[in-house]
Image (tube, grey):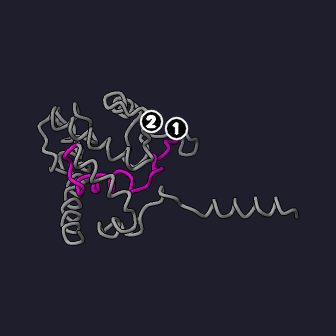
């Protein structure tokens, strides 16, 4: 085997083993562990907190719920007759699970044309922008993880109509987001 071919095989093997930053941190139940393992995430969260006012723990709890900190997260496929894939449930993608239309709106509104949903800096900034829009349109405090999550999931107009009231599973999920937000807040206070 030639040296070039061997080198290419080694490079391909090494590249296939790396999870990169799209792989989630090891312990998602420990905010201090996430901060230690991914300091760039924390810098992004803190930057968003300074710029938009959304607390780090609210961002973290929402990202946990939306993508489990996976940068390449996508919605599941839908199937016809249980076997024929017909596309994904929605265009949601990345850490923040922003859908195409809302992501495009964010890029236009903020001038961040090169923003990508699989980069934590951009996903965190998007979340800050979106939650501020929810505060302006629906009066939801930036510290209110539960209601911010409901507006995040249903859209600001859906939240205003109370569409989540017909989705008991979503109300439970929003309560979980609030609980995780409080847990992360307490952990972050101790590890700083």
User: Tag on residue 4?
Assistant: none
Could you classify mark 1 by the number of other residues whose Cα lies within 10 Å: few (under 14), some (14-19), or many (20 or more)? few
Query: Quadrant location of residue 102?
Result: top left
137 magenta-colored: no
Query: Which is nearer the N-term, disc 2 or disc 1?
Result: 1
- The location of residue 111, given as percent across then percent down, is 35, 30
Q: Is residue 158 left or right of residue 110?
A: left
User: Number of numbered discs present?
Assistant: 2
Q: Is residue 9 above or below residue 120?
A: below
Mark 1 sits on what residue? Answer: 87
Please tell me which residue lies in front, 73 or 127.
127
Tell me which residue sits at (48%, 40%) in the image. 88
**The N terminus is located in which quarter?**
bottom right
Mark toward the viewer: 2 or 1: 2
Of residues 159 and 42, which is closer to you in this image?
42
Q: Residue 189: x, y in percent?
A: 18, 67
What residue range appears in magenta?
52-80
Element on which disc 1 rests: strand
Q: Residue furthest right?
A: 1
| Res 8 quadrant in image | bottom right
Q: Is residue 60 magenta?
A: yes
Looking at the figure, which quarter contains the C terminus? bottom left
Disc 2 crowd rating (10 Å Cα; few below 14, some 14-19, many 20+) is: few
Q: Which residue is mark 2?
A: 114
Provide the secondary structure element on which disc 2 rests: loop
Q: CA distance from mark 2 to mark 1?
A: 26 Å
Residue depicted at x 48% and y 55%: 22
- Viewer-closest of 3 and 149: 3
Point 20% across, 38% down: residue: 132
Is residue 23 positioned above or below 48 on the image?
below
């Amino acid at each position: 085997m030639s040296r070039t071919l061997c080198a290419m095989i080694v490079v391909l093997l090494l590249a296939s083993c790396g999870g990169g930053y799209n792989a989630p941190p090891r312990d998602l139940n420990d905010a201090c562990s996430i901060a230690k393992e991914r300091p760039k995430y924390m810098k992004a969260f803190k930057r968003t907190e300074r710029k938009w006012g959304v607390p780090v723990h609210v961002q973290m709890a929402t990202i946990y719920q939306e993508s489990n900190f996976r940068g390449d997260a996508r919605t599941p496929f839908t199937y016809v007759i249980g076997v024929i894939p017909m596309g994904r449930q929605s265009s949601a993608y990345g850490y923040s699970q922003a859908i195409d239309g809302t992501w495009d709106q964010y890029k236009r509104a903020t001038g961040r044309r090169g923003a990508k949903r699989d980069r934590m800096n951009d996903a965190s900034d998007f979340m800050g922008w979106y939650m501020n829009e929810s505060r302006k349109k629906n009066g939801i405090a930036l510290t209110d993880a539960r209601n911010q999550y409901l507006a995040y999931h249903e859209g600001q107009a859906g939240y205003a109509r109370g569409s989540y009231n017909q989705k008991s599973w979503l109300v439970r999920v929003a309560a979980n987001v609030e609980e995780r937000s409080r847990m992360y807040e307490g952990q972050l206070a101790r590890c700083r």
